[in-house]
């Protein structure tokens, strides 16, 4: 359970669709593309953090949501290859957290297999658990789960949207080859 007392959300447009950004007192608690009605996504996240969500002030440029949105824009423009927005990991535990932290070490523009991430997370036989961690991450894009691929190099899923995963990989490989 997150210890923040208030949570703000912002819906940010991106090339991969609308992204919901939810932040509390300790950083971003979730950031991911979503489909479907906003009210349903707000209800789902509100249940996860066990608190109501309030809209972020769209005019505030210094809020955590605004910082995350700005960093996403820089990422999609090819001006950012890492994110430094504060993340609130309090709802991510155990091996899931270890796997997602290992994913953060995959360099921009590169990919790693589920098995490689399992080894880096300290559980060499947990490739499937890495897949589950990637599928359930509260931090898409900023924790680059799109960089995790199958052992044969094929992409695999990305929340049922493999075209988004391919787009993110293409963005990174396109920009990294220009630098």
Image: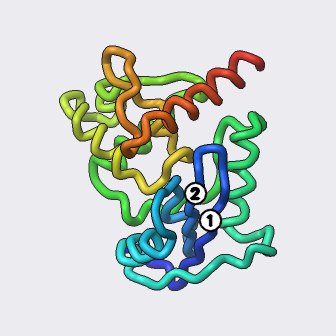
- Left or right of residue 89, residue 129 in this image: left
Estimate how packed mark 1 is, as few (under 14), some (14 to 19) or many (20 or more) residues with alpha carbons within 10 Å: many
Q: Residue visible at 25% across and 31% down?
A: 127
> How was this image coloured?
rainbow
Q: Residue visible at 52% across and 53% down?
A: 33
Q: Is residue 13 above or below residue 134?
A: below
Percent x, y for residue 102?
Answer: 42, 37
The answer to which quarter of the image holds residue 19 is bottom right
Percent x, y for residue 43?
Answer: 41, 77
Q: Mark 2 sits on what residue?
A: 19
| Numbered disc 2: secondary structure | strand
The residue at the far left in this view is: 125
Q: Mark 1 sits on what residue?
A: 11
Callout 2 touching callout 1 (CB < 8 Å): yes
Percent x, y for residue 93?
Answer: 32, 57
| Numbered disc 1: secondary structure | strand
- Left or right of residue 12, residue 128 in this image: left
């Amino acid at each position: 359970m997150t210890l923040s007392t208030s949570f703000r959300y912002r819906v940010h447009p991106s090339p991969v669709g609308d992204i919901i950004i939810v932040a509390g007192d300790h950083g971003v608690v979730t950031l991911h593309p979503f489909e479907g009605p906003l009210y349903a996504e707000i209800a789902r996240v509100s249940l996860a953090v066990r608190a109501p969500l309030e809209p972020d002030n769209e005019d505030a440029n210094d809020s955590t949501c605004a910082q995350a949105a700005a960093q996403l824009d820089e990422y999609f423009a090819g001006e950012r290859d890492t994110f430094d927005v504060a993340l609130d990991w309090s709802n991510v535990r155990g091996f899931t957290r270890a796997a997602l932290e290992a994913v953060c070490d995959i360099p921009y523009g590169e990919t790693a297999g589920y098995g490689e991430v399992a080894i880096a997370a300290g559980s060499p036989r947990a490739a499937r658990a890495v897949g589950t961690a990637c599928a359930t991450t509260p931090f898409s894009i900023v924790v680059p789960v799109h960089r995790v691929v199958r052992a044969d190099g094929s992409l695999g899923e990305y929340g049922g949207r493999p075209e988004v995963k391919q787009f993110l990989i293409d963005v990174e490989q396109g920009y990294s080859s220009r630098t």
